[in-house]
Image (tube, helix red, strand yellow):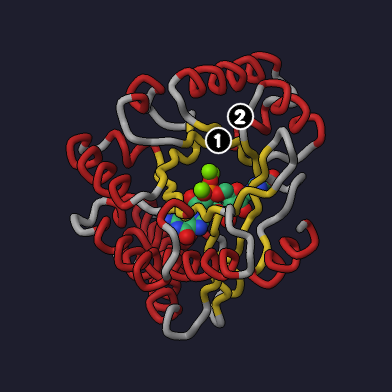
Amino acid sequence: HAKSNGGSQYRFYSKELNASIKRMVDMEASLRRALEENEFYVVYQPQTDIASGRTIGAEALVRWNSKAHGRVSPADFIPLAEQSGLILKLGQWVLEEACREAKRWEQAGWTSLKISVNVSAKQFKQPDFADVVKDILKDTGLDPRKLCIEITESVVIDKLMFTLKMLDELVALGVEISIDDFGTGYSSLSLLRQLPISVIKIDQSFIAEMVEVQSVRSVVAAMITMSHHLGKTVVAEGIESEQQMAWLREMGCDNGQGYFIDKPLTAELMRARLKNIS
Ligand code: C2E
Ligand code: MG
Ligand code: MG
Ligand code: MG
């Protein structure tokens, strides 16, 4: 009996597992077709100068509206795209799309706006990544100084010599580099000091916890002060309230983004917003 029970339990477990594996495999197959099927689009979350309230640019964020799976969050499909290697094509498409849109802003007379684009570990680790960026800048005609590439701390720490060389190549093109989700990984400001990184983005978990926890507010203030001593610009992400905005302003945080300022907007809504403020 024990054996047959174990057996059925195994079958049950295996059924659940199969269902979840099947969903992943299905999703990966859909993901593989999604570019050709035009299921991806890019949204733009405005970034503002906290002291003046001026819009200084936006972060490009990819969206997937799948015929088979509906709206899938990037938190779910980016890791899948990364595992399967599809991130290379997808990431290149996002970069191109975002640069093309930023060029439109420039042509419409919003000449100081920057575009920030997330780049995944696998993308950044392609030996020819700087050439990919260079070609996209050339094809879209975007001023390299208008592009900021966001990488995460884990990308920086892993293969430090390669990272240094790649960062130098990117900086030589004229693009800016920012560290996304700062504070969640294992890099230190002293390591970042030695790298040609100009922007530190404080992870949204710190901004969220600032509200309740006084010690987190102190940590945020310290991160801002230290970043400034190292000559870096600081961006706070995930600002959801007036109170957070007021604290960050008082702490001298340079730039911010979050639902309190704006949600990520479609390209059309972003342009409409730019028209309204200028
Ligand atoms: P991230 O780069 O740290 O982007 C910030 C995330 O916070 C975005 O989620 C954004 O929609 C969300 N957010 C913005 N303001 C607020 C706020 O006030 N409160 C809260 N709770 N959240 C806010 P999203 O768009 O779901 O993207 C999640 C992550 O997926 C991104 O984190 C980024 O790591 C990745 N991702 C998104 N687009 C791309 C892409 O084109 N390429 C790559 N490689 N990764 C991407
Ligand atoms: Mg980001
Ligand atoms: Mg982030
Ligand atoms: Mg994040």
- What crowding class fits label 1: few (fewer than 14 Cα within 10 Å), some (14-19), or many (20 or more)? some
Outermost residue, bottom direction? 37
- Residues at discs 2 and 1 in contact (Cβ within 8 Å): yes
Q: Nearer the viewer, residue 278 or 60?
A: 278
Location of the N terminus by quadrant is bottom left
User: At 52% across and 32% down in the image, what residue appears?
Assistant: 233
On residue 206, the disc is 2
Q: Which quadrant would residue 22 be assigned to in this image?
A: bottom left
Q: Nearer the viewer, residue 81 or 55?
A: 55
Residue 225: x %, y % from top left:
55, 18
Residue 250: x %, y % from top left:
73, 22
Residue 66: x %, y % from top left:
55, 77
Q: Is mark 1 within 8 Å of ligand 4?
A: yes
Residue 232: x %, y % from top left:
47, 29
Measure how far apart labels 2 and 1 are at the Cα level. 6 Å
Q: Is residue 9 visible?
A: no
Q: Is mark 2 within 8 Å of ligand 3?
A: no
User: Mark 1 sits on what residue?
Assistant: 203
User: At 36% across and 49% down in the image, what residue appears?
Assistant: 174
